[in-house]
Image (cartoon, rainbow, N blue to C red):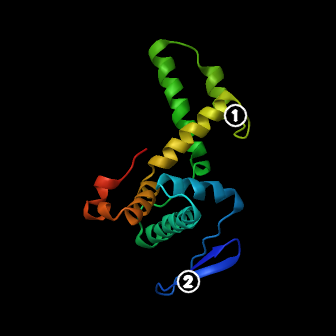
Amino acid sequence: MVFISVDGDWVGGVADTAKIMMVNVHPAQYQQIEDNAAEYGYTGEDAVTRGYLATILHEVQHMIQVEDGMPEGTSDMQMIDEAKRKLINVYKKEAEITGEDWSDTIAEIENVDIDSDSEAAEAVKSAARLRYKHSAGEVQARNTEKRYFDPALRDQPTEATEDRK
């Protein structure tokens, strides 16, 4: 069974072998749900329901990825360390090419407080978000949402409808 829970209230169950999955929607995710609905052009009473459905489809696709051994979903926060490494490598290469001293910038990135409003923190968060959006598991999960809401896309190969934003 796949059980769906929204803030602890059970809203449905879908038969699926003997697997159990809970999709808990934290209040902080409500804006993302509304954004999902807006992305697909839904407004009015149906918008939030469709936003929840998009979120559920997205998360269930991640469950399928785990079961099938495919690249899984991630989060921008999980990508922070990788983003820091990539940014540091860019500055090191720049230093090699130009001879400029980027050691202070590199140290700032290495020791950044990700919750601060510093330029380094914003650069790391932006790079992490980009890496998150480009990860194979996230591209596939967004594609699942998009193809569900636009039946015309279902006739095309999945590769043709993937977004790489």
The front one of 44 and 119 is 44
Q: Name the residue under label 2.
A: 13
- The residue that appears at 50% across and 70% down in the rendered structure is 60
For the point 72% across and 37% down, which residue is it? 113
Is residue 17 positioned above or below 73 on the image? below
Left or right, 151 with reference to 23: left
The 10 Å Cα crowd at callout 1, few under 14, some 14 to 19, many 20 or more, is few
Q: Is residue 123 above or below residue 156?
A: above
Q: Mark 1 points at which residue?
A: 111
Q: Residue 134's x, y, as percent? A: 44, 47
Percent across and percent down for residue 16 are: 47, 84
What is the number of callouts on the image?
2
**Quick check: can you spot residue 65?**
yes
Give amino acid for label 2: Gly
Q: Earlier in the sequence, mark 1 or mark 2?
A: 2
Q: Is mark 1 on a helix, strand or loop?
A: loop
Residue 55 is situated, as x and y percent measured from the top left of the image, at 54, 64
Question: Given this view, does label 1 or label 2 mark the residue nearer the observer?
Answer: 2
Provide the secondary structure element on which disc 2 rests: strand
Tell me the amino acid under the disc marked 1: Asn
Q: Which residue is drawn at 62% across and 79% down?
A: 11
Query: Considering the image in quadrants, where does the C terminus appear?
Result: top left
Residues tagged 1 and 2 counted as in contact (Cβ below 8 A):
no
Above or below 15: residue 122 = above
Give the camera-side residue of 116 and 165.
165
